[in-house]
Amino acid sequence: MILRFFAAVVLIYALGFLGFAVALPKPATDEKTDAVIVLTGGPGRIARGLDVVGQGLAKEMFVSGVDPEVKPAEFAAEFDVSRRTMECCVKLGYLAVDTRSNAGEAAQWLKENDFTTVRLVTTDWHMARAASEFSETLPPEVEVIKDAVPSHPDLATLYLEYNKLLAAAVSQGLPR
């Protein structure tokens, strides 16, 4: 009996991982939002956020999890952002150190700016956990559009992220 239970748990885990790995989210359509939130940590994320603002699909971009040593001018130079765009449309957040604190930092910024629709930009393999953390943190009236940056993750990255997603789901189910 115990062996069957253990085998069922392993099978459910393996099928869950397979579903996670083969159904990575895609980039969003050209739907307009008040803002775009970009989570640092992967290639193509900031470029995607800047592209969204450049196309007029969002008014402002908030970059969460920026290293405290990075100055706005350095950021602008690194990503070829004009001074005008930096002043009007790009805000850097320096407080977040992980996905959960990204959600908290972004929630505070959204509240301060009274935004109700937001495009969340992160890498495809990271989107499920990021969206989960954001849905747990943001008020229900804030609409989140998932905009995944396509990547080619290796098996180790997918395995680690799947386990982080499961851990986040367990921790979100615990009483606070």
Image (tube, rainbow, N blue to C red):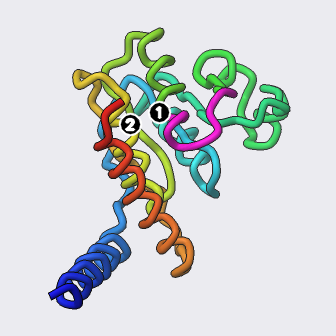
Magenta stretch: includes residue 148: no
Magenta stretch: includes residue 99: yes
The residue carrying mark 1 is 103
Vertical order, 27 against 109 (above or below):
below
| Quarter assignment of residue 118 | top left
The residue carrying mark 2 is 134
| Quarter assignment of residue 33 | top left
Q: Quadrant of the N terminus?
A: bottom left
Front residue of 131/13: it is 13
Residue beneath the point at 54% across and 29% down: 61
Gap in Å between the C-alphas at discs 2 and 1? 5 Å
Front residue of 52/154: it is 154
Vertical order, 120 against 160 (above or below):
above
Residue beneath the point at 41% across and 56% down: 167
Front residue of 46/138: it is 138
Q: Position of residue 42 (x, y in %)?
A: 62, 55
Mark 2 falls on what kind of element? helix
Q: Which residues are magenta?
A: 94-103
* Mark 2 residue type: Phe
Residue beneath the point at 66% across and 27% down: 95
Q: Quadrant of the C terminus?
A: top left
Is label 2 in contact with label 1 (beta carbons under 8 Å)?
A: yes
Q: Position of residue 85 (x, y in %)?
A: 65, 24
**Seen in the image, is 37 located left or right of residue 5?**
right
**Seen in the image, is 158 located left or right of residue 14?**
right
Vertical order, 114 against 136 (above or below):
above
Q: How many marks?
A: 2
Q: Earlier in the sequence, mark 2 or mark 1?
A: 1
Q: Position of residue 117 (x, y in %)?
A: 32, 26
Q: Residue furthest left?
A: 1
* Mark 1 residue type: Ala
